[in-house]
Amino acid sequence: MGKMTYTEAKKELEAIVFAIESGELDVDALTEKVKRASELIAFCKEKLTKTDKELQKILDDIA
């Protein structure tokens, strides 16, 4: 994923979901896109979890 941001990952994931839902993908590309979507979901979950922990630490320090 390199230096991808959460926003970039979310946009790419949304584009993949749209392509799947609209039927734009052929069977050959479907597996590749679903695999990429899985990677993006894992990346976003990791980012959200890390952010949640950082925010919780900041809030704990304030209290």
Image (spheres, grey):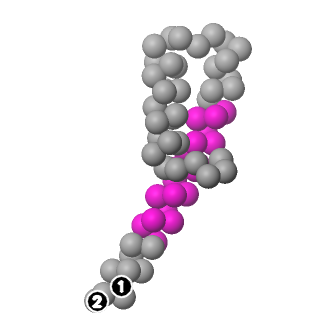
Which residue sits at x=53%, y=11%? Answer: 24
Which residue sits at x=45%, y=22%? Answer: 18
Position of residue 22 measured from the top left corner of the image (x, y, whole percent): 45, 13
Q: Check if residue 56 falls in the magenta segment.
A: no
In which image quadrant can residue 56 be found? bottom left
| Mark 1 closeness class: few <14, some 14–19, many ≥20 residues within 10 Å | few
Q: Report which residue position mark 1 lands on.
A: 60
Three-letter code for the amino acid on which mark 2 is drawn: Ala
Position of residue 7 measured from the top left corner of the image (x, y, whole percent): 45, 45
| Distance from Cα at disc 2 to Cα at disc 1 | 5 Å
Determine whether the residue tagged by mark 2 lies in a helix, strand or loop: loop
Determine whether the residue tagged by mark 1 lies in a helix, strand or loop: helix
Whether pointer 2 and pointer 1 mark residues with C-beta atoms closer than 8 Å, the reply is yes
Which secondary structure dominates the residues rendered in magenta?
Answer: helix
Which residue sits at x=42%, y=80%? Answer: 57
Q: Is residue 39 above or below residue 19?
A: below
Give the residue furthest to the left: 63
**Would you say 31 lies left or right of 57 here?**
right
Position of residue 62 measured from the top left corner of the image (x, y, whole percent): 30, 87
Residue extent of the magenta highlight: 35-53
Q: Report which residue position mark 2 lands on.
A: 63
